[in-house]
Image: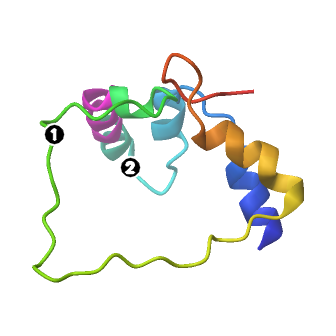
Amino acid sequence: MADRVKTILDAKYEKANLDQVAAAQTHLSAEEREKLKILLGKYETLFNGTLGKWQGKPFDIELLPGAKPYHARVYPVPHAYERSLKTEVEPDLDGQLLRL
């Protein structure tokens, strides 16, 4: 489990090469791989290696009358992974997520 967490926290997000992704799907026929490449290209911005920003309208979540907030213990993060976690979730001065 710790290795999985480290892999996620230390991930370096890069733009995906959609041609390579489609070509690697050897279980598909050549025609299906071409269709997959076209489909991935249609949504290319999803694979550009960035997290992006919410583009929709602001919204509010309304609670039921009488609902009380629930507070639980913080999910424990091993000390060895704290720097990686902070790099992933804390914004820098421009509001962008920090990257190593």
Which segment did they paint magenta? 35-44
Magenta-drawn stretch contains 41: yes
Q: Residue at x 48, y 23 (%)?
A: 95
Q: Residue at x 46, y 34 (%)?
A: 51
In the drawing, does residue 73 fall left or right of residue 58?
right
Q: Where is mark 2, residue-wise?
A: 29
The x, y position of residue 73, in whole percent, is 61, 77
Residue 87 location, x and y as percent?
A: 69, 37
Q: Is residue 56 left or right of residue 8?
A: left
Label 1 Cα crowd, 10 Å radius (few <14 / some 14-19 / many 20+): few
| Image-based side of 53 in relation to 12, left or right | left
Q: Is residue 12 left or right of residue 59?
A: right
Question: Measured along the vertical axis of the image, is residue 27 above or below residue 1?
Answer: above
At label 1, which amino acid type do we have? Pro
> Mark 1 or 2 closer to N-term?
2
Q: Secondary structure at mark 2?
A: loop
Residue furthest right in the image: 80
Which residue in the structure is indicated by mark 1?
58
Position in image of residue 42 (x %, y %): 25, 29
Tell me the quarter of the picture where residue 4 sits.
bottom right
